[in-house]
Image: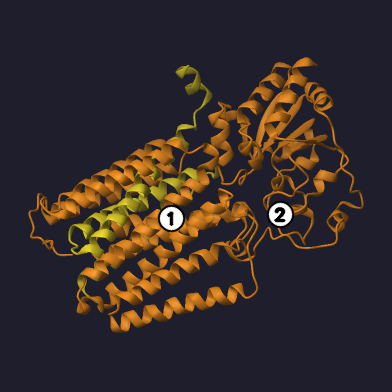
Amino acid sequence: MSDMNLLGSVDLISSNTLALIYLISASLFILGLKGLSSPKSARRGNFIAAFGMILAIAASLTKIHPNGNQITLIVIGVIIGSVIGGFSARKVKMTAMPQMVAAFNGVGGGAAATVAVIEYLRLSVANRSVVITALSSILSVAIGGISFSGSIIAFAKLQEILTGVPITYKGERFINAAVFLAIVVIGIYLIAFGTGLAILGVLLLLAIILGVAFVLPIGGADMPVVISLLNAFTGLAVAASGFVLGNTVLIVGGTLVGASGTLLTKMMSDSMGRSIRNVLFASVGKVIDQPSGASNSTTGGTSSVRTGNAEDIGVLLAYSKKVIVVPGYGLAVAQAQHTVRDLARALEAKGAEVTYAIHPVAGRMPGHMNVLLAEADVPYEQLREMDEINDEFKDADVVLVVGANDVVNPAARNEPSSPIYGMPILNADAAKNVVFLKRSMRPGFAGVDNPLLYAPNTIMLFGDAKDSLLALLASVKAS
Amino acid sequence: MTTATLNFLTVFVLAAFVGIEVISKVPTILHTPLMSGSNAIHGIILVGAITVTASTTGLLGETLGLVAVILATINVVGGFVVTDRMLEMFKTRRQTEVKK
C-alpha cells in the first residue's frame, strides 16, 4: 500500500517509523514464542507477545484519517470484538479450553479471508492481475476459509454439538478432492484474468465447504491435532494477506505461527505414536460393525468384568503403599479435579505415596490435564510424565484410572490390528490392581475396545467420576 | 518480480525458519498453551483489518471491514486472555503457599 490512504493522508508518524514499530513487534512475537516454550518463562512470553501486538495495533491506528466514517467503524469493531473475546475467554471453563482455542482460531481465519476480499475489492483490475497479488489473495481467501469452517466443526465436535464419531460417507474423499480441484482451477482462472469479484466469492464458498468436509470425517479424539493444523493454516492465511497488503508484520506474525504450528502439529501426532496423515485421513474412532463378543476375543476368551463397590475399593486403597492416579477426560467432564486431590490427600494421610501419571494426550489436548490438576492445587511434583513413571507401575499397589481409557489400552502395544496400535500408553496393566472409575463399558473417545477392562486384576466402579471419588473418599476415611 | 516482492519473500522464508527453530524444544505440558499463544499471535491480522478498512469506501467494503475488525479483535483479545488463564494455573507448591 502507498503512504497515502484514499481520503488523503494526515500521518501522525512516517511510514519508516511505522515500519520500525512493526519490526519491534515482530521481534517481540519471536521472543514471546520462545518464552512460551519453557514452563518458567511461559507466562512472561505471552505478555511479551501481547505487548508486541498492542504496539503494532496502536501504530496502525495512527494511519487512519480521523474524520472519516472508517475510524468510527474501526473503533466500534474493536470494542465489540474485545467484549466478545474478553468475555468468552474469561468465562470459559477450563474443561472447555480446547474448543475455545478452536473458536478463536476460526475467527482469525475468517478475518484473514475477509481482509483479502476487501483489498481485492479496492484494487483496480490491472492491479488484481499482478501475479503475486492475485496468488496471495487467493491463498488467503482459500486457506482462511478452510480454517474458519474447519475450526467451527472442530468446536462443534468438542462441544458435543456434533458427534465425536467420524462422520464418513461413500465417496467422501472423491468429493473432497473434487472441491479442492475446483478451488485450484478457480484460483488459476483468477490469476490469469484478474477479474470477477463474484468468482472470488465462489472460491470462498468452496473453501468453506472444504473446511467442513475435511474435518467431519476426523474423530473427536484427534481434534487437538486438527486445531493445531488449522492454527498453522490461519497463520499462513495471515501471511498471505500480508503479501496482498505489503505489510511485513503480517508476513512475519503469520509465518511464525504457520511454521511453528506445523511443527507443533507434528509433535502432537508423534506423542500419539501416529503420523499426521493417519490422524487426518484414517477416520480413527469409526465404530466398525462386528458380531458382538468378537472384540473380546483379544482378551483370550475372558469377557467377564469384575465390578466392585466403593467400600471394598476404599479399603484396598487405604491399605496401599503406592497409588498412581491416571486422570482422563472423564475427570474433567465430572469437574472432579478437586475431589481427586482430596482423595489423594486422604491417602497420603494414611501413609500412601500418591502420584499422577499424565499421558501426553490425556484429556482432549496435550497439557490439558496438567492445567486442570494445577487448578485444583495439585503440586507440580506429583504430576509425572509418561516416560518417567512408566517403569513404576509394576511397583504400584493400585492404579486408579479416573475417566481415562485409551491411554491405558494395552491393545496399543499388543494388537497390530488395533487402530491405536503403536500409540505409547501408560503401563497401568503392570500394576497389582487396576481400578477403573467409568460411567459405562462404552469405549473411549477413540472408539476402541480396551482389553484391560476384562483383565483379572481389574475392578470396575461404575458411575460419575465425582460421585465415585466422593464415595471412595468416605470409605477411605472410614477405614 | 519487483524488489519489494523479493524483500517480502526473504522475510517470509526467514520467518519460517525462525518459527520452527524457536519452538523446537517444547515440553508436552506446554503444547496447549503454546498453541493458544501462537493462535493469539496470528491475531496480528487485526493490523491488516484496520489498514484495509481505513482505506475502503462503499457499503460492501465498510461492512466487510467492520466484520474483519470484529473477528480479528476476538482472535487477539480472546487468544491472549485464554492463554494467560491457562498459564496462571502452572504454579509450584511454593508459590501457592506464599499466596495463601
Report the number of discs: 2
Viewer-nearest residue: A328 or B24: A328
Q: Earlier in the sequence, mark 1 or mark 2?
A: 1
Residue matched to label 1: A106
Give percent across and percent down for residue A394: 78, 37
The image shows residue A166 at horizontal and vertical percentages of 64, 60
Q: Which amino acid does label 1 sit on?
A: Gly
Give me the chain letter of mark 1: A
Query: Label 2 is placed on what type of residue?
Result: Gly
- The chain ID associated with circle 2 is A
Mark 2 Cα-neighbour bin, 10 Å: few <14, some 14–19, many ≥20: many
Q: Which residue is rendered at x = 42% and y = 41% of the image?
A: A88
| Disc 1 crowd, CA 10 A, few/some/many (<14, 14-19, 20+) | many
Q: In the figure, is residue A383 to the left or right of A307?
A: left
Q: Residue A447 carries which label?
A: 2
- Which chain did the image draw in orange? A
Relative to A210, say whether A28 is above or below. Answer: above
* Front position in the image: A69 or A336: A69
Q: Are marks 1 and 2 on the same chain?
A: yes
> Is B11 on the left-hand or right-hand side of A265?
left
Horizontally, residue A52 falls left or right of residue A396, namely left
Which residue shows up at 15% across the image and 53% down it?
A64
Q: Which chain does yellow denote in the image?
A: B
Q: Which residue lies furthest to the front in this view?
A: B59
> Residue A430 location, x and y as percent?
80, 40
Q: Quadrant of residue A108?
A: bottom left
Which type of secondary structure does the marked residue at label 1 adopt?
Answer: helix
Quadrant into which the C terminus of chain A falls: top right
Alpha carbon separation for disc pair 1 and 2: 27 Å
